[in-house]
Amino acid sequence: MATPANPYSRRKFLWIATATAASTIPLKGCLGNPPETTGGSTTTNTPTATGTVSGPAPETTKIRLGYIPIVESAPLIIAKEKGFFAKYGMPDVDVAKQANWASARDNVVIGSDKGGIDGGQWQMPMPHLLTAGIITNGQKVPMYLLAQLNTQGNGIAVSGKNAGKGLGLKINDPDYIKGFEKTEGRKFKAAHTFPNVNQDFWIRYWFAASGVDPDKDIDLLAVPPAETVQGMRNGTMDAFSTGDPWPYRIVSDEIGFMAALTNEIWKFHPEEYLAIRADWVDKNPNATKALLKAVMEAQQWCDRPENRKELVEICAGRNYFNVPVAVLRPPYEGKYAMGDNKPNVDNFKSGPLYWKDDLGSVSYPYKSHDLWFLTETMRWGFHDNAIKDFDMAKKLIDSVNREDIWKEAAKEAGFTADIPTSTSRGIETFFDGIKFDPANPEAYLKSLKVKRA
Ligand code: CA
């Protein structure tokens, strides 16, 4: 396996220089209800972050949260492993690996009482679709969206067979893709891991921005990652909408190259979220806030550059991602070998971020981002146009998005400086100049050339 040269030691040194302050700040005084057990099943030492343990005692100490072994899940894993769940009185949180998104969906329908899960990590807008019964054969499973887990960390990979054809952030020659059937005897074939959610949206946006219609000009399918990578290797699969740590392997194993990172398509875009069954939250409001405080503290821990080495070691472990540390380290340092003669990316803020970015809070679930995902759902006519109009979209968002609980938890923990003042992050701008104004989503839909709506 070819390892890309790694000329980044200077950056590492700079990180170390910023590493001291956080660990010397003492924990603020506990105002009550400290957890009876600390540590428990956790593997490591005292939390180093500074949230205040306050508020009424959690109604329960346990919940089962599903996760998928990709970088989006890090805050859940870190909250468990670094003892943050325990710190806030939830020592028995079970962070449970899900085989794939379909399993996560099926398990949350079942609930933890019957061996499923109570909530966890979701692509968008799965919580809204579950709530409306759109991806569960009409069975409504009301969910509350409680926090965003991360931004960025995803990208569009293309197989080596298509190198040298100008497939970058912009597709220089869309006719190369549209003409594939004539030259190759089959359509250009692209994959994501689950339909009608983030990865599907990112690759659709990328194709459509260059005038390639993802429903007509190519074959776009849901395929398990291992099968996709095998197809890219043997020349039967052309593109993969994927997330870290896959991009590293695509390039280092010489399977292909990265056409674009999602942070180039939409800088600091919304990515995956924490959502829990509404019945669980309604029954356990204090435990919900305790969970949220722990996740918030984990997110802050994750974003301290000096913690990234340990983050990688924990997440790469056999119990979690089960990948070599070397595969996970580069994205966590913001380093992406792009391949196909594209310059490498080396910017901490191009990789996954968890707590804050240059546009505001990462953790806070902006309603304006939910609206983009539902607008995009309408754009492509997903689920037989089950999201009928913006009225329905907004009502659904108001029932699912519980940014109010996020704010309460942040306040109780003392993370007050990072609480946004609006439920909207404002106008969003994409790489092709298209703008999404949450106050006027109709104008965004109108401005798009390739669409079903
Ligand atoms: Ca993702």
Image (spheres, helix red, strand yellow):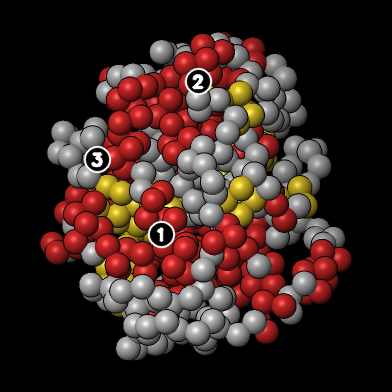
Q: Is residue 158 left or right of residue 318?
A: right
Res. 408 mark: 1
Q: Of the residues under marks 1 and 2, which one precedes in the sequence?
A: 1
Res. 131 mark: 3
Q: Are marks 2 and 3 in contact (CB under 8 Å)?
A: no
Whole-percent x, y for residue 137 in the image: 17, 34
Q: For the residues carrying marks 3 and 1, which lies nearer the camera in this image?
A: 1
* Residue 435 in view in this figure: yes
- The amino acid type of the residue labelled 3 equals Thr
- Comparing 62 with 406, the one in front is 406
Q: Are marks 3 and 1 in contact (CB under 8 Å)?
A: no
Is the residue 160 above or below the residue 309 in the image? above
Q: Of the residues under marks 2 and 3, which one precedes in the sequence?
A: 3
Q: Is residue 413 left or right of residue 290?
A: right
- The amino acid type of the residue labelled 2 equals Asn
Tell me how far mark 2 sits from mark 3, CA to CA: 24 Å
Q: Which residue is mark 2?
A: 440
Whole-percent x, y for residue 139 in the image: 15, 39
Q: For the residues carrying marks 1 and 2, which lies nearer the camera in this image?
A: 1
| Residue at image point 33% right, 37% down | 398
- Comparing 355 with 7, the one in front is 355
Whole-percent x, y for residue 238 in the image: 56, 31
